[in-house]
Amino acid sequence: MQKSERRLLRRAVEVARAAMRDMEGREVPRALHPVAQSTGRRLPAPLEKRLLKELDENEWLRGQAAGDFDGSEESDDPHERAAALFLLRPEGWEDHLEAIRRDLRDAWNSDRIERYQRRIGELESDLKKWKRDARRANRRAENAGREADRRVERAWEEARSTVEPELIETCDRLGRDNRRLARTLEGTRAELGETGQRLAEARDDLERERRIEHAPPARSSTLNVWADMDAVEAARQLDEVVQAFFPGPAPVEVEPVAAAEEPLVLPAGVAPNSPDAVEWLLELERPFALLVDGYNVTGKMYPSGQYPPDQFSWPETRDRLQNDLAELKVRARSRPRITVVWDSAVAIETSAQTLPNGIEVRYTGEGWTADDELIDLARHLGASAAVVSSDRKVREGAQQAGSLGLWSEALTTWALNG
């Protein structure tokens, strides 16, 4: 049962839980004992799915819930109508329920489009205002520059009438030299800018060819002046050149997740290799960090028996996983910190960057594997972290640090099922 259907039938879930609270313990179906024991305001997604499945299949339980239900299929509230159709089962109830779900989805999409359109209009209005302000500021700057030139010229004229001719000639010569040096400096800056652009393009070529050690390097079809050079040596020389000319900004600092005393523990019936484990994380309201073993997960997405042997390490594959993680971050209640770690055969030192979508990406350096980095991060975050990997060494290291260990299959199945 999809999440949208569960959300539509939450009124039916509330009615069924109320009916179960009035039952004797022996009357509650065995499969629903965990549901009856749950005291939270909202059921976790796995238990909610279990209760709806039992309601759908168990006519007696559905009758008990319907007996306590005071709603009507004629109600103006779509959730009330959906609960009435699901519990009372009038003729054609499935078609009516599907129509309600479709109407709610269309209304949600329309509202979302309208919000985006309003936001676009506000941004366009702001942009026009900023452009007007910029034009006014430019005009003021030009007027101020012309006024300054006039004042300097008047000052020179006054000085010429009182200063020795030799001194005036020396000042004129120094002014000409200053203008010539300024033009030379401007030309040098332009050349440095072009050099920096060429270096950036070369670094992009190397980045596209980055692979783990056992993956065959992909050669670019475009001309690459670094093609015949060892990749590690080329990267080292580029780093030295770029650092000399363009030191660049400091590395991105990722805000740490607050330490937690209580460890993350999956609810009963939720397996660590099941997509339900990911759904459970999405519903958490406490902050947490999700640490992902990059190539271990993509290896499960693209097994070598069904795909080209190195597809799991293609740049497009890494981008897909990072986009799936960005969607997970948006859908999660607590907007967790998400870090994906990739092995690298090129980087000399472990590097970290935060993508525009909020995902932190780390490439491990020479002599330091993604497994080492994940276990080290888990030791720092402890009970605040969940680690995704099918590597037993990684999961056991994370669990010893107090973190929750999930299998890569849980994430891949969740991502592939949307």
Image (tube, grey):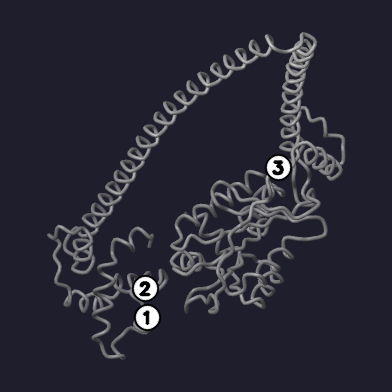
Alpha carbon distance from label 1 to label 3: 53 Å
Determine the residue located farthest toward the front in the rendered image.
162
Q: Quadrant of residue 284?
A: bottom left
Q: Select label 1 or label 3 by which is in front.
A: 3
State the residue at coordinates (63%, 49%). Answer: 318
Sequence order check, earlier mark of 2 and 3: 2
- Residue 19 versus residue 150: which sits nearer the camera? 150
Spatial distance from mark 2 to mark 1, Cα to Cα? 7 Å
Up-down relation of residue 212 to residue 386 (above or below): above
What residue sits 62% from the left and 61% below the top?
A: 292
Tell which of 129 and 326 is nearer to you. Answer: 129
Point 74% across, 42% down: residue: 247
Which residue occupies the foreground of this view, 212 or 305?
Answer: 212
* Between discs 2 and 1, the one toward the N terminus: 1
The residue carrying mark 2 is 43
Which mark identifies residue 248?
3
Dot 3 lies on which element? Answer: loop
How many other residues sit within 10 Å of disc 3, few (<14), some (14-19) or many (≥20)?
few
Residue 60, how many percent across, how many down? Answer: 24, 79
Q: Identify which amino acid the numbered label 3 is placed on.
A: Gly
